Image (cartoon, rainbow, N blue to C red):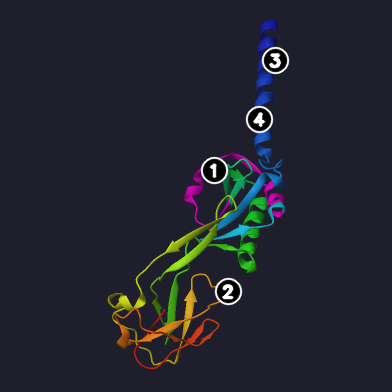
Amino acid sequence: MKKNRFMIAIACIVFVCAAAVVFLSAMGKKPYRNLDAAQIVSANVLLSPPDKAVEIEDIPELVGYLKDVVIYHQDHSYTEYDGQGVIFTLTMEDGTQIELMAYNPFLVIDDVGYKTKYGPCEALNSYANALLNSGTANVILEEPPALSVVSDNTAFSALSGTYSWQKKGVDGNSISINGDSAHPLDCKELLSPPYETQEAAAALRFTEEPDTIFSVKCWSDEYWGDPAASSEDVVINGTAITLKPGDMFMK
């Protein structure tokens, strides 16, 4: 009889322990509750769609959102879902990086998916979209934005020319990139056939609008193959340019 009581006692302990595990799992945990903003050197967030990344300057504000995040059990079924993911990349003071994606109802931390509490995850998503839509956050571009010229309701892609580009690395320092190309006067075969328009103006459309367009140059068609030929200035008003009559090409 004593043996049966002992077995019953063990069964009760096991049941209580199992119930405690289930209870704690249901409560979830906050993986970033002890995160300190001083531990983060830099941070950015990529929103997909629209596949744009912005720099996060107010690190304490980001940490405030991360502290509220709650995760439950591992769940990798997020790969079966469609929607917007916002991917935060944190560069820590020890040189390591943490990547986490808010993808409600999941949070993916360094490629490990977890079911997450809806409210804090949605707040992270809204925070990232607010940064992108603010118009004041620094958009991170790996290379110069693509340019299209629009006239008479038709858009044509422009060739990329020589450029000097700077971006901020994960350590916060600037990285310089230089791209080279042939002179526009040596690119006739790449610009054929020419585009004809009856309009007197065209609009310059970039995948990411610049703060300022400093200059636009044009040459007469007669100067093909003569890189030493002098160019003419094109009148610019914001992102609109005035077209010159005749066969011209621009850079």
Kindly identify which numbered label has been placed on residue 110: 1
User: Label 1: how many residues lie within 10 Å, few (<14), some (14-19) or many (20+)?
Assistant: few
For label 2, the SS is loop
Give coordinates of residue 19: x percent, y percent: 67, 29
Q: Nearer the viewer, mark 4 or mark 2?
A: 2
Mark 4 or mark 1: whose residue is earlier in sequence: 4
Residue 26, by quadrant, is top right
Q: Residue at x 68, y 41 (%)?
A: 30
Mark 4 or mark 2: whose residue is earlier in sequence: 4
Q: Amino acid at mark 1?
A: Asp
* Spatial CA span between label 4 and label 2: 55 Å
For label 4, the SS is helix
Kindly identify which numbered label has been placed on residue 9: 3
Q: Amino acid at mark 3?
A: Ala
* Spatial CA span between label 2 and label 1: 35 Å
Q: Is residue 21 left or right of residue 246?
A: right
Give coordinates of residue 55: x percent, y percent: 60, 58
Q: Given the current orientation, which residue lies at the most extreme front position? A: 228
Q: Amino acid at mark 4?
A: Val
Mark 3 or mark 4: whose residue is earlier in sequence: 3
Mark 1 or mark 3: whose residue is earlier in sequence: 3
Mark 2 or mark 3: whose residue is earlier in sequence: 3
User: Label 4: how many residues lie within 10 Å, few (<14), some (14-19) or many (20+)?
Assistant: few
Question: Are the residues tagged 2 and 1 within 8 Å (C-beta)?
Answer: no
Residue occupied by mark 4: 21
Residue occupied by mark 2: 211
Quarter of the figure that contains the N terminus: top right
Q: Residue at x 41, y 84 (%)?
A: 231
User: Label 2: how many residues lie within 10 Å, few (<14), some (14-19) or many (20+)?
Assistant: few
Q: Nearer the viewer, mark 2 or mark 1?
A: 2
